[in-house]
Image (cartoon, rainbow, N blue to C red):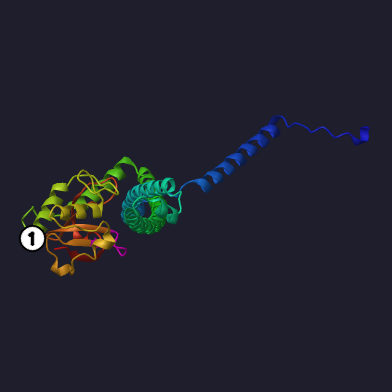
Amino acid sequence: MAAHRKPRQRTLTGPAGRTAATLALAGAATATAFDGAAHAEPRLTPAQVKAEVDALYEQAETATERYNGTKVKADKARTALTHLRDEATRRTERLNSSRNALGSIASAQYRAGGLDPAVQLALSSSPEEYLEGASLAERAGSRQAARITAIRKELARIAELRTRADGRLTELKASQSELARHKSAIQEKIGSAQRLLDRLTASQRAQYDQGQDGRDQGAASPAPGAVRAPNARAAAAVAYAYGAIGKPYVWGATGPGAFDCSGLTQAAWRSAGVALPRTTYTQINTGQRVSRGDLAPGDLVFFFSGISHVGIYAGGGQIIHAPRPGSAVRLAPIDQMPFAGASRPA
């Protein structure tokens, strides 16, 4: 038994024990340091943070314009679905009235139709009156047959309406799912940008915000009316945009209290009596395309390769636009972003 007994481990004491403990602690500290380094977020310079944040906001704006376009589709599908359902309800009510009338006629005929027509003629005290009544009954039968034909047509029409309504409902549900995806993408990009900004010190964040504001304000901002618009409608659109300066950017907003970029241009031109479509990539195809050298106040100016941003030209090399989440409508130099094109709505 003693030969198989596990030997007792010796506990180190004295200087040897202290040395072993020190080595163990040092090893644990080293492992922790390496583990922390593996999980620590890389340190970015303020310039790198700014570049990443700007890219995230551009991606968020692209998703916002997709959201806006999908919302237009969803609204159209919802409106069409409501109209189809209303029409089906009205036709169903008329169908029920026709069915009730047909049922009353059938009941009356059942109650009065117990005798053979030849017997009724033989028993009639006035054969002339009987034959006249029979002629009226034949015409009534023709009208009844016409009612049945009309009812059958109405049933087919109601079935068609319900089929179309089902299609619109499917389209609406697909648009709603797409809206949810775009909304999630927007929130994810904005959240990532905010987390990056939160890594800046207070002074670095102040410099970032000041750089955004200072870059947007420009050196020579034209006063309202200082540059002549080509027509009264363009002047009205520019005046509206000036009046919106300072109002917050909110994605999906079209005013009057908040705007996204295409929501601002749409609202500005709506105030002038001109209906623009909702998104940047549809607004650029509205009206007449103009070159950068021919810009006039009121023109729509588009930026980035994906046509994801738009502002309204104010003259003097400046635009009025709703820049990004966390900012407000403001004047900005046209050179601030990569120019992608311009159009003149009217």
Residue 12: quarter of image: top right
Residue under circle 1? 229
Tag 1 secondary structure: loop
Q: Picture coordinates of residue 115 (x, y %)?
A: 45, 50
| Quadrant into which the C terminus falls | bottom left
**Residue 174 left/right relative to 292:** right
Does the segment drawn in magenta span residue 306?
yes
Residue 238 visible within the image = yes
**Relative to 308, residue 103 above or below:** above
Say above or below: 18 vs 101: above
Range shown magenta: 302-308
Residue 106 percent coordinates (x, y)? 41, 49
Query: Would residue 107 be counted in the magenta stretch?
Result: no
Left or right of residue 67, residue 22 in this image: right
Task: Give 34 or 221, whichever is nearer the viewer.
Answer: 221
Question: In this orientation, which residue lies closer to the viewer: 282 or 222?
Answer: 282
* Amino acid at circle 1: Ala
- The x and y percentages for residue 176 are 39, 51
Q: How crowded is mark 1: few (under 14 residues within 10 Å), some or many (20 or more)?
A: many
Residue 13 in the figure: left or right of residue 255: right
Q: Can residue 73 be seen in this view?
A: no
Which residue is at a point 43% across and 50% down the rendered structure image? 113
